[in-house]
Image (cartoon, helix red, strand yellow):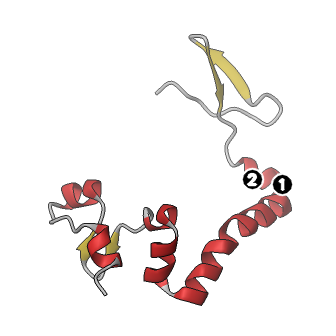
């Protein structure tokens, strides 16, 4: 392991010419700002889910669809299927089957 925890007063260090920033739980230092930023970042996804349902939200946003790992018992990510020794289902088959 090449990283080690740092502190807010000295959050970076250099090791072998690489600058590391490893301050644990930086968001705890600014909880209100962190909460506002996180809420703003996820709100579009929540609204899309609420307004269109899971499958349509994923059809509309390719980036969002990449977050789906398993749906209705079908594994949609190759790494998950390999790790669990289960068959892989093409996500497009699920998203565009109806």
- Of residue 35 and residue 8, the one placed in the foreground of this image is 35
Q: Quadrant of residue 92?
A: bottom left
- Of residue 98 and residue 4, the one placed in the foreground of this image is 98
* 91 in relation to 94, above or below: above
| 86 sits left or right of 92 in the view | left
* 10 in relation to 86, above or below: above
- Helix or strand or loop: what does disc 2 sit on? helix
- Of residue 85 and residue 49, the one placed in the foreground of this image is 49
Residue displayed at 45% across by 74% down = 59
- Helix or strand or loop: what does disc 1 sit on? loop
The residue carrying mark 2 is 27
Residue displayed at 59% across by 87% down = 50
Residue 94 appears at what percent x and percent y? 30, 77
The residue carrying mark 1 is 30
Mark 2 near mark 1, Cβ–Cβ under 8 Å?
yes
Residue 7 appears at what percent x and percent y? 75, 34
Q: How many marks?
A: 2
Q: Quadrant of the C terminus?
A: bottom left
Residue displayed at 20% across by 61% down = 84
| 39 sits left or right of 9 in the view | left
Distance between mark 2 and mark 1 Cα atoms: 5 Å
């Amino acid at each position: 392991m090449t990283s080690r925890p740092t502190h807010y007063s000295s959050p970076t260090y250099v090791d072998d010419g690489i600058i590391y920033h490893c301050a644990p739980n930086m968001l705890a230092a600014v909880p209100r700002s962190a909460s506002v930023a996180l809420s703003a970042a996820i709100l579009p996804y929540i609204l899309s889910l609420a307004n269109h349902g899971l499958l349509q939200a994923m059809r509309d946003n390719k980036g969002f669809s990449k977050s789906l790992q398993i749906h209705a018992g079908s594994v949609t990510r190759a790494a998950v299927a390999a790790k669990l020794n289960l068959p892989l289902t093409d996500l497009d088959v699920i998203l565009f089957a109806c």
